[in-house]
Image (cartoon, grey):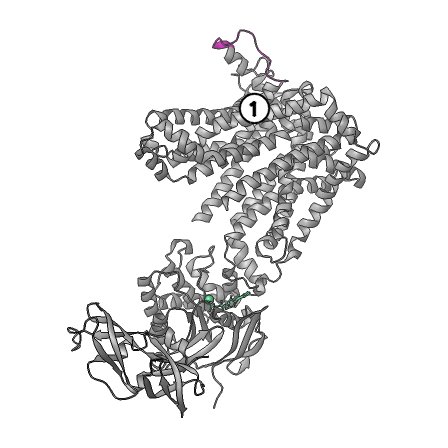
Amino acid sequence: MLMNFDKLGAWRWILSGICALMALFLLLPILFIVALSFGNSRWLIFPPPGWTLKWYGELFADPRWLQAAFTSAKIAVIVMVLSVAIGLMASLALVRGRFRGREVLRGFFLTPMVLPVVIIAVALYAAFLRLGLNGTLVGFVIAHLIVALPFSIITISGALETFDPSIEDAAILCGASPWEARFRVTLPAISHGLFSAAIFSFLISWDEVVLAIFMASPTLQTLPVKVWTTLRQDLTPVIAAASTLLVLLTVVLMIAAALIRKGKSR
Amino acid sequence: MLSFLTPARRGSGLGMAMPALLLLLAFFVIPVAGLLSRSVTEPVTGLQNYETLLGSATYLRIFFNTFLVSGLVTLITALIAFPVAWALAIMPSRVAAVVFAIILLSMWTNLLARTYAWMVLLQQTGLVNRILMAIGIIDQPIQLTNNLIGVTIGMVYIMLPFMILPLYGVIKKIDPAILQAAALCGATKGQALRRVLLPLATPGIASGALMVFVMSLGYFVTPSLLGGTANMMLAELIVQQVQSLLNWGMGGAAAFILLVVTLALYALQLRLFEGKAR
Amino acid sequence: MTSPHLHINGIRKTFGDVVATDHVELEIGEGEFMTFLGPSGSGKSTTLYILAGFQDPTAGDIRLRGKSILQTPSHKRNIGMVFQRYTLFPHLSVGENVAFPLRVRRAPQAEIAAKVKRALSLVRLDGFEDRMPANMSGGQQQRVALARALVYDPPVLLMDEPLSALDKKLREEIQYEIRRIHQQTGVTILYVTHDQEEALRLSDRIAVFNRGRIEQVGTGPELYASPATHFVADFIGDSAFLTGELAEVKDGRATLRFTDGTVLADVPMHGVGAQGGKAELMLRPERIDLSDTVGPPGASLPVTVEDVTFLGNNSAVTARTGWGEPLYIRLNFGHPMMASVSRGDKLHVRWQPQDAHVFTKE
Ligand SMILES: Nc1ncnc2c1ncn2[C@@H]1O[C@H](COP(=O)(O)OP(=O)(O)O)[C@@H](O)[C@H]1O
Ligand SMILES: [Mg+2]
């Protein structure tokens, strides 16, 4: 009876209670910063004595915030495109290829996900010092790509595995050339996987802190780096404003992802 | 069954994996190997970096902090995640969908934004201290940041989804008929929980716990923002050695130890759970 | 004579040491419904895949209307195929699935619309254009696949066990549909199945596959009445085999001696066998009679009844020959022996001379 919600009796309320508390625990801090970003207390008193938009004003008045956001977006978009393209090719090899050591290769492709980012960051930092890539866009893109790629490969391989290659054969017999079959049939059929991989990759790059701290230079920094350096100085409400905008972006992307999933199941 | 290579699939050999392979070799394997090799070559060839790391109280304290926090975080998340995952597996799906949305929102919200929230909430004049004083548990604000309490709270917050989601997957797969059978056999709810549900969920708990533990060991952002320099963890040590002290030998040695522990636990995870799933 | 519509000319295909097909030789006429029948692993699919161009033969040729197509890539062969598995494009509606072959051929929009409508109507799925494949039953999906394969009027339609994933009732329903569509369109069909009933129900001719080779080609009645090999006799219809020794071989007829000394003279023989070699006598349960009197020489054997099972409209009798081999006889309801036969009876089985066949044993 433990797996039947209606037959749990009093336990039902205990479980629901724990679940609700946990949900509040996860949700409240996020709502809390959203609220603080509109509060007029520089000392982050809660509940705020009054409401204001001045933190957003400060945020947008400082060109460094905008600059950092723009850099973040630029890097995230490049990483997204490369991660999906390279991830798609790697997935095709892993799912469709017939060569020895395929499983080993799969494991290898996923290791950057398992290893602590801090190790990758320090190692890349040392390597980039020699190559002169620290503080460059290329350096950022490579670093973020390394950690985004495993997620891309997992997502796209997953989609590709559920796609029966006979369908591609059918397209070819229908008269499509092998490349036409790939572009008109296989890619659209796994498009949900490609979109998820794109969203994952974008978010991973967009949110990446540790790698970015090491890659950044005074002239080139991403939004998380800007938040990080500001945070280490003081807890200004401007960060609450920036965080709120980041939450907003997350919500938008989550809705997009949900819509894609819905579109797939239809 | 159709194991032949159709024309469409002939091109999908190792060649397609090349871009990813080269990228990872050049910018992952070689750099990491380079970093690790510096641990035995700088400042001079030898194991002296490891001797220093494992021989001095200062550094052992850092290892202790790292394992203590990771262990606590794992324990607390497991205790919270089990009832939550269980509830999610059986509650009406509309309600569960709301809870899932919250879990995903928190998971995907910028890490710094979330850590910032806890820095504000836990500070001396923060909401947590004031609520605790208002309900009379304490009468002086207590120190909740710049120590391991703050780190633990912040990390539990971040790790919870990583425990709930896999555990949910395991519990959801349990056939309700098994628990109906337990009830018909005369088991009370407590007995069914202890003797049937928990054992069946154990692989999920263990797998999630290992994952959370491993992730916590190498975490950098939350410990350094909520813990302060007095209560360092391993990842902070690596960064400090490399960035502030330019001591690549010590940084590499600490990284190597972290890497070995991580990979060993990961291999354990694969051995324990992949083998069983098949 | 003009060249056949489709000529499968001595196809051989090996995978390393495995010989998948060997010396497959077949001529198929335009509009014919030809079925490849055989157990799993006998090389049927391999032959179809070579036709489709998914695999290249190790040796041999495929000629369509007199011209070899081996050098033509799959997508230019213009061949239609329905697969065993569901291969509708999951992201396209039913209408777009059927339109796909026309779109890649860059057909004009008006023509596409008309042909799609016609093809869907042919498989009785009018008005399903906007459905997504995921929302259709297996039977419906295979009908759409059929429409998609027919919409460009292929010279040959290949079907590789298209109904094996469906349940029996649905399978019979769609078999009937396929027959109707064949008659309506006159398309040449190559159909693969391991189900003899399905093969008999659908086909003009059947090619029986065994271990990569075609054992016999013929219409259903031909295969049943005069199987060329032990395998065909065993695979099509029920049969019993009695093992003996060739006492004499002359003009394609044999005299058989069994271990207890019983002799059967003048039975039609298949295969090459020398005097003294082993051979088998094949009899079909429904083509032999049970009687208390001995029959003409060469068409009768004495047996002892071991078991009688009443099955409604017939009875199944198990009898044993003098040398101990079992023999099964089917007595239709109303047969004079049906009421009286019982265990231990010493009787005679009798048959028409053309119903017995001798196969040499290697
Ligand atoms: N790609 C392949 N590699 C190795 N052996 C194969 C391959 N495809 C088929 N075979 C072998 O060839 C034989 C014929 O297979 P197939 O044509 O699929 O038989 P059927 O369709 O009659 O069941 C089988 O023994 C099968 O194992
Ligand atoms: Mg087959």
Query: Toward the viewer: B33 or C62?
Result: B33
- At 79% from the left and 35% from the top, the residue drawn is B38
The chain containing the residue under callout 1 comes to B
The spot of residue C40 in percent (x, y) is: 45, 67
The image quadrant of residue B222 is: top right
- At 66% from the left and 27% from the top, the residue drawn is A228
Query: Toward the viewer: A108 or C159?
Result: A108
Main SS of residues in magenta: loop
Is C122 above or below relative to B246?
A: below
- At 57% from the left and 73% from the top, the residue drawn is C57
Is C303 above or below relative to B222?
A: below
Inspect this view and state whether residue C78 appears: no
Query: Toward the viewer: C95 or A130?
Result: A130
The spot of residue C244 in percent (x, y) is: 38, 81
The image quadrant of residue C253 is: bottom left
Q: Which residue is mark 1?
A: B72
The spot of residue B192 in percent (x, y) is: 37, 31
Q: Around disc 1, counting alpha carbons within 10 Å, would you say few (fewer than 14), some (14 to 19), or many (20 or more)?
A: some
Residue type, mark 1 in image: Leu
The magenta span reads: B133-146
